[in-house]
Image (cartoon, rainbow, N blue to C red):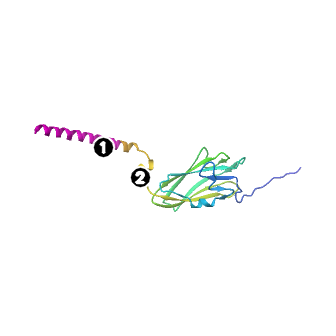
Amino acid sequence: MVWSWQKVCGGEHQGGVNIGFSPSTAGIYRDGQLVPSFSKFTAKATDRKTDFYLYTEEDVKQQYDGMVVTATPGGVLKPSLVIEKQSLKSGFLTEQPIKLSVYYDCLKRGDAQVTVSLLFPPYKMVEFTWQKRCVRLNPLEEDESWGGGQLVTLFVVFTIGIGLSSVLLKKYSEERKAK
């Protein structure tokens, strides 16, 4: 009887995993390495999130055992991750792209370095880093819509304006009649 097996001890990731800004391009990570042009990427001050797409080469299924996002220096930005249809703790990448969204919660004005770390056992972690410029946007810009409180305020101001206009118009009419 003969026993045999192959032991993979890890090391650098050998490719198969692609990361890009769209489901069909690997402009961030491909062929086991970061794309050099990505190092120049900076998320704008008004960006609330950045979407990335993760997928593998055809007929490749790659397990991941965690995804983490960090920002330095602390106190400028609190980033968070949301992955479409999967868990951040573990899952599989296939040739079908999945969307990974990094949401930015800017705490104050400044620049932060954002890093996403992806653990693909038994290989070393895949990390990609970019800059995010932060400003504190007011709630209207943050929501990009009118909230309930703002609509109530607008309604009250509008109602007071109509009421005040009718009182002034009535007073004006009475003064004209008196002359």
The magenta-colored residue range is: 152-179
Q: Residue at x 70, y 50 (%)?
A: 57
Which of 2 and 117 lies nearest the eye of the viewer? 117
Which of the pair 109/23 is nearer the observer?
Answer: 23
Main SS of the magenta part reads helix
Q: What's the residue at 59%, 61% (across, down)?
A: 39
Q: Nearer the viewer, residue 68 or 130?
A: 130
Left or right: residue 43 compared with residue 14: left
Side of 42 where 28 appears, left or right: right
- In the image, residue 174 lies in the stretch drawn in magenta: yes
Q: Amino acid at mark 2?
A: Asn
**Splitting the image into 4 quarters, where does residue 165 fall?**
top left
Residue 112: x and y in percent read 52, 61
Give the secondary structure at mark 1. helix
Q: Which mark is residue 157?
A: 1
Q: Is residue 170 magenta?
A: yes
Q: Which quarter shows the C terminus?
A: top left
Q: Residue at x 17, y 38 (%)?
A: 173
Query: Label 1 sits on what residue type?
Result: Val
Q: Which mark is residue 138?
A: 2
**Residue 48 percent across, percent down from the top left:** 50, 52
Q: Earlier in the sequence, mark 2 or mark 1?
A: 2
Q: Is residue 99 above or below residue 44?
A: above
- Return the residue found at the far bottom: 73
Classify residue 154 as left or right of residue 78: left
| Between 150 and 37, the one nearer to me in the picture | 37
